[in-house]
Image (cartoon, grey):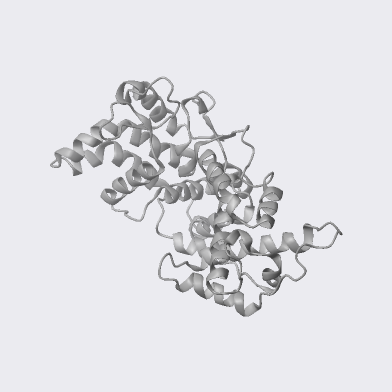
């Protein structure tokens, strides 16, 4: 099991006993189909909702754990509207439309299970009245809308190679007068180039890069094995291919990984960093990967770039050379609808290509 899943499963096991018994029943029902990370998000959403119920006096239970089913049956549409308002306007951690829609979707899943699937000892539904069945949850991001937001914020085909080249040769020139920045760059240059090249030539997520172990890389077959988001099979890693362009960078990094980062033999992580005050390398954090990409992107003149936008850049380029379903499989999308953003992103490119003179 990857590191994130282990951490989330542990937190899930700690939080679940504080939930009402019927929430625990629902989570156990979903356990075979969803990852610990997804289930933990459910539990966090329910904790927010039940805590709000208590604060608003909509339940007289002493704690979240004691909220009875009958209190859910008594809820009106006004109550749900007020909860939505609370999520949008609370002083700390106010939520955007996407987060609110997700939290309401979590509630609807729970209420649906209690009213349509779970039964009492007399075979009657546990929840007799389901107010969430009346709640319409609008899709907040259509593929076309997402594509519109991304337009102009990704690397185009020629810029993919230019960005990698910049990290290799251009950045040290730009920071030549900054001794500290130059020293840090020289220490981590091969690793940084490798990470950026791998993402731009495979479309891996930051969590997938973070979880990579040395044994996951097969240079001969040009593929790596990753735990895909949303897949709850902890015994199976999905093979993901990378382009030839990433092979040399990976080879160079693997050759100097042990020498540069002095990792103990037990350390399996592919990408390492030496923390301040430590002598041995350990797994590079997700945050460090994100900050590293942003550092180079700002100097490159594209401060809006992130790991996820590098993934989008690869995907757009890949889609132009392949089709929707190959792109979906390469990126690990559960639905082709998610992949459709690249069809919208490439509309302009395709329109220009139709009138492009033959060479």
- Which residue is rendered at x = 58% and y = 61% of the image? 64
Closest to the observer, 132 or 352:
132
Question: How many numbered marks appear?
Answer: 0
Q: Is residue 142 visible?
A: no
Closest to the observer, 251 or 275:
275
Q: Quadrant of residue 241?
A: top right
Q: Is residue 194 visible?
A: yes
- Which residue is rendered at x = 44% and y = 71% of the image? 90
Percent from the top left, x then y, of residue 63?
57, 62
In the rendered image, the residue lying farthest to the front is 62
Percent from the top left, x then y, of residue 210?
45, 38
In the rendered image, the residue lying farthest to the bottom is 78
Percent from the top left, x then y, of residue 212?
48, 33
Q: Is residue 242 above or below residue 220?
A: below
Closest to the observer, 170 or 280:
280
Q: Is residue 322 above or below residue 256?
A: below
Give the left or right position of residue 59, taking residue 217 as reference: right
Percent from the top left, x then y, of residue 320?
53, 49
Q: Is residue 212 above or below residue 149?
A: above
Q: Quadrant of residue 193?
A: top left
Give the left or right position of residue 340, taking residue 113 as reference: left
- Which residue is rendered at x = 66% and y = 74% of the image? 75
Quadrant containing the N terminus is top right
- Which residue is rendered at x = 48% and y = 64% of the image? 148
In the rendered image, the residue lying farthest to the left is 177
């Amino acid at each position: 099991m990857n590191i994130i899943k282990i951490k989330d499963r542990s937190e899930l096991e700690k939080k679940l006993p504080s939930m009402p018994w019927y929430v625990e029943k629902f989570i156990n029902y979903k356990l075979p189909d969803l990852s610990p990370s997804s289930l933990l998000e459910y539990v966090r959403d329910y904790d927010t909702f039940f805590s709000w119920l208590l604060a608003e006096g909509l339940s007289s239970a002493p704690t979240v754990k004691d909220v009875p089913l009958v209190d859910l049956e008594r809820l009106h549409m006004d109550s749900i509207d007020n909860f939505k308002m609370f999520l949008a306007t609370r002083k700390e951690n106010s939520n955007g439309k996407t987060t609110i829609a997700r939290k309401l979707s979590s509630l609807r899943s729970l209420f649906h299970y209690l009213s349509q699937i779970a039964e009492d000892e007399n075979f009657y539904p546990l929840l007799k009245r389901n107010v969430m069945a009346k709640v319409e949850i609008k899709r907040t991001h259509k593929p076309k809308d997402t594509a519109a937001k991304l337009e102009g914020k990704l690397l185009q085909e020629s810029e993919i190679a230019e960005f990698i080249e910049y990290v290799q040769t251009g950045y040290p020139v730009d920071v030549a007068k900054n001794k500290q920045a130059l020293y840090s760059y020289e220490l981590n240059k091969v690793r940084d180039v490798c990470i950026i090249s791998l993402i731009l030539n495979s479309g891996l997520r930051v969590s997938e890069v973070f979880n990579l172990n040395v044994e996951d890389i097969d240079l001969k077959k040009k593929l790596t094995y990753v735990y895909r988001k949303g897949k709850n099979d902890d015994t199976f890693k999905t093979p993901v291919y990378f382009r030839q362009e990433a092979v040399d960078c990976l080879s160079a990094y693997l050759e100097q990984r042990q020498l540069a980062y002095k990792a103990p033999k037990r350390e399996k992580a592919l990408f390492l960093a030496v923390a301040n005050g430590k002598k041995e390398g350990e797994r590079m954090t997700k945050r460090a990967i994100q900050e590293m990409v942003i550092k180079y992107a700002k100097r490159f003149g594209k401060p809006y770039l992130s790991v996820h936008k590098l993934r989008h850049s690869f995907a757009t380029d890949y889609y132009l050379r392949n089709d929707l379903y190959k792109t979906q499989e390469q990126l690990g999308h559960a639905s082709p609808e998610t992949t459709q953003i690249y069809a919208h992103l490439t509309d302009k490119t395709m329109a220009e290509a139709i009138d492009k003179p033959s060479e």
